[in-house]
Amino acid sequence: MGAHALLLVLLRGLERLMADRVLVIGSGGREHALAWKLAQSPHVKQVLVAPGNAGTASNGKISNSAVLVSNHTILAQFCKDHNIGLVVVGPETLLGAGIVDDLMSAGVRCFGPSAKAAQLETNTSFAKAFLDCHRIPTARWKAFANPQEACSFITSTDFPALVIKASGQAARKEIIIAASKEEACRAVQEILQDRVFGEAGETVVIEELLEGEELSCLCFTDGVTVAPMPLVQAHKRLIDGDKGPNTAGMGAYCPAPQVPEALLEKIKDSILQHVVDGMRQQGTTYVGVLQTGLMRTKDDVKILNFNCHFGDPQCQVILPLLKNDFYEVIQATIDGKLCSCMPAWSENRTAVSVVMASEGYPGDYAKGLEVTGLRQARELGVEVFHAGTAMQGDKVVTDGGRVLTVTAIKEDLMSALEEANKGVAAIWFKGAIFRKDIGYRAIAFLQRSVGLVHGDVSVYTLTSNALVNQSEPPTVTGSRSGSHADLGGSTDLFDLKATGYDDPILVSRTKGIGTKLQIAQMCKKHDTLGQDLVAMCVNDILAQGAEPLFFLSYFACGKLDTEVAQAVIAGTAEACKKAGCALLGRETAELPGIYSPREYDLAGFAVGAVERGQMFLQLERVAEGDVVIGLASSGIHSHGFSLVRKILLMSSLHYSSPVPGGCGDQPLGELLLTPTKIYSKALLPVLRSGHVKAFAPIAGGGLLESIPRILPESFSVFLDAYSWRIPEIFSWLQTEGNLSEEEMARTFNCGIGAVLMTDKEMAQQVLKDVQRHEEAWLIGNVVPSHTGSSHVKVKNLLKALQLKRFQFLQSTADVDSHLHVEPKKSKVKVAVLISGTGTNLAALIAYAKEPASCAQIALVISNKSGDVEELRNAARAGIPTRDRSKNFVNHIFSHEKITRKHPFKEYCCTGWQMNFNDAIDQRLATFGMRPTRVVDHKLYGSRSEFDCTIDRVLEEFSVELICLAGFMRILSSAFIRKWNGKILNICPSLLPSVKGGNAHKQVLQAGVKVTGCTVHFVLEEANTGAIILQEPVSVNTDDTEETLLERVKEAECRAFPVALQLVASGVVRLGADGKTCWKQGTHSLTHYEKQDCISSSTTL
């Protein structure tokens, strides 16, 4: 044996030693397919299936296990005892029961979503409410617990409410599709009264019956990245021609050729990614496989249901097409690294699966019938996945309704179906039922001539000239030397030589608009979108130092509206003129099968040129000390609109609402649609001067992700948000959405549309050159980068955003007419009650000194001895303090040149002829401080007596609001009732998710991803209060209670002053019903108020 061959043998042996044992849980065809695919991995040495079936019993690497999977504690110990490195869960019942949560908590890696995430499948009401909340298309619906109300809805609604589902997790998978309203009412009675589904039937969801083609779309997801699988169509009716009763699935084929690529992209972005993002934003990261049942109607694609795992038979038809190592894909998904291990699928191959079922299925059926011909079928080259089978001696017998799935893979659909049917014909058991027409819809589609109309799907391509000729054409300007768009023919020409370049490099960019387009369609404002399209392409070209030469546009719609199309084209032409490039070509396509009648999409393509030696992105030129110049944006530009749209959906405002105070006097939708700035004409001379080292537009990923694209790995930039003007719309979005500083910087441009980098010596000159055309500022510097740190640090961003908000609240001149914030003749007097250190006292004092502040800290009271530093700082700030503890008194007299060792004791216990309070007052006066009074809880016999004393002192100083900043005494009910709506407290957690003490410990033990703090009004009931403001804090994987405590403290210091301003300004108050009330038009979302649109309570 040669050295090379010996090395290979050794490596394979080492692989086997290091390989994992994997446990697959379940007993169906899906679990057999999962085990079959996992066994192909060199990383896997054994696959156990619990309980398994005849197909997974002693089959190479695969064998069955009798471990009790319903007891998660026993299962976790089994996995540890048998060195199980990975558990893959099949059935949804176990996912809903929390098996993934329990195993992962026990240190056993498990693939699948948490119980909370699995509610998408196990709780129909939750899933439907989630879809509505995130505006994801689904059938119209309503949930009921009362059968009479449900029947009344069925008979009175204006749509066919004929689909009846038990809301909870049921053992049966059939959905009742009624043929009439009477039959639907009978189904409701059976579920709610007769309880045919048991506990799952406590609530029913009544849905609209949709008409169209049903499809299954699956994806892997790690909670952020979505990796779609090929589209599947399953056949659920029992008999050929889609006749007979509904089943769990009688076969499937993959991929579905009748679905165009454009629609697949739309499903990925608008449905799968939207669902995963929505779950994450609600505090639940979805990890695993997500399967969506889709209905392709004549107008749109709508979600029918979710499966939080591979479906059956979808799993048996998809996995044979996976080219990657299935084990590696699963591990990457669990680790949150799916983007580094994206699955690849066999091209030009089609899979067909045919299910063989027992006679009587989906009703009663016999078991124990011998199955023969399995070996002969496998010899034909098909895969036979067992489901309802068992071993009886050395024989395979039937043991379920669906017995086997036969899967064939061929170059085309017809060949795959023929091969699968041959495999089915080789297998026999008494009374076997199966279909012979799997994929018949796709086969009919493929047999038709390419380009003809198929069903309700048609494609018409219109030249832009044909569009323009339908009515008065727009004025198309923006032509330039080199363009020959008027020469005729089907192509567009550009003469590069005519532009005067000697040795040019061509630079191109293609872009679409995204969610901003949806907002434009809702606002019926289309004339600005062309500039967005041109600006995104041209500004990116500019990053290479290239001059834009020409632009091409593409307009696709469901049904052509010439007015809309012409508005878009006219806007595009005008934008090309601003950019200095030619609008060389336009294409318009009408695609009624892909887009709804009023829906359209845009794409743009730009080409520019730059001399070979003048290209940018030469990262080696950037050096420490370089200056960052920021160019003003016109607003949000074209990125971050998914988040904008979600904030608007949760708010009380609409796109037609007046712009919220301080942001202008136009409709909100119009402000949001302010077009992206085009920088080419203004910046090209500056870029060609040789003084600019790098240029980057702020695009997707905001400040934090756009700027690093022009930075070497060894450098970072440090920006100061106080150095530029932030448009008011960003302050409003931050407040309305309760967004963190990082969320703002990672999503939006925050007023900076693009950045330049230049030498420190040339910074002022470059700035002046830029300011001749654009508003610009020196906003930061290039600094050395530290390992693990962010490449962009934005200082004071949240403070700058909040300052904008404060200025609005204070300035009556800028108060929007719908807000009605009355100007304050004098500041509201506030008392701060602390115990010891007073964690937030310094932040409140600093805030009160701001000119825009509506509050004045009139009094600080401490009830116990401790660190007197905070009281000393308060006193120095001219704020009266109420502490007569020994430490404080000793501190006040520490500079007295007297022999007394214990001044506190002597003042209290000797026969001095001086009132104790007066003595302290006099001593404070010598330091230029204000007088005090005694409030020490140790000197009072009861809580009510202590509270009465505090109350008298508060009245003495005409206090109007009270802030509890680490105040550790429980206030009496009488005190709270008297000061109802006037007491603010801050809690170191996001109420109501985490209550009581040890909040940080609870958060870490629960494994949640987000915590934070909550400012709320104090009510009589413990652990309750009307929420004013919440500040979220991300929980890092390496956090301890101490590190989390520090970051939450920082959040408290930001949130408490903002909440106090809201209350002191009159924007927020406590209503008579004990709930927070906002002035009309100013309602700011808190973390949990965002979740009000879903039916179940949200926890993080």
Image: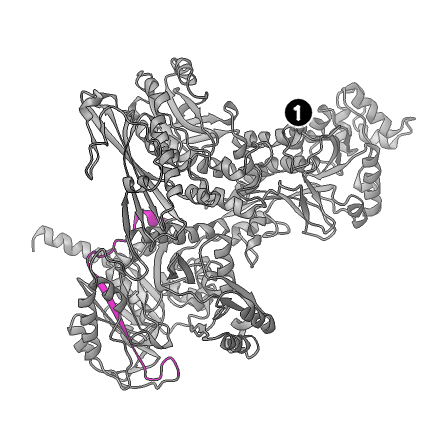
Q: Position of residue 731 (x, y in %)?
A: 55, 34
Q: Position of residue 603 (x, y in %)?
A: 32, 41
Q: Position of residue 982 (x, y in %)?
A: 74, 41
Please state which of residues 487 and 283 is positioned toward the viewer in this rendering.
487
In this rendering, the count of numbered labels is 1
**Residue where numbered disc 1 is placed:** 851
Please tell me whether residue 194 is drawn above or below residue 921 in the rendered image.
below
Please state which of residues 347 and 636 is positioned toward the viewer in this rendering.
636
Residue 125 visible within the image: yes
Q: Position of residue 468 (x, y in %)?
A: 32, 39
Q: Amino acid at mark 1?
A: Pro
Disc 1 element: loop
Please give the range of residues in magenta. Answer: 337-363
Residue 51 visible within the image: no
Using the rendered view, name the quadrant where residue 952 is placed: top right
Please tell me whether residue 764 is drawn above or below residue 529 in the rendered image.
above
Q: Is residue 559 left or right of residue 1087?
A: left
What residue sits 77% from the left and 23% below the top? 929
What residue sits 30% from the left and 44% below the top? 588
Is 593 a magenta residue? no
What residue sits 56% from the left and 75% below the top? 192
Using the rendered view, name the quadrant where residue 968 is placed: top right
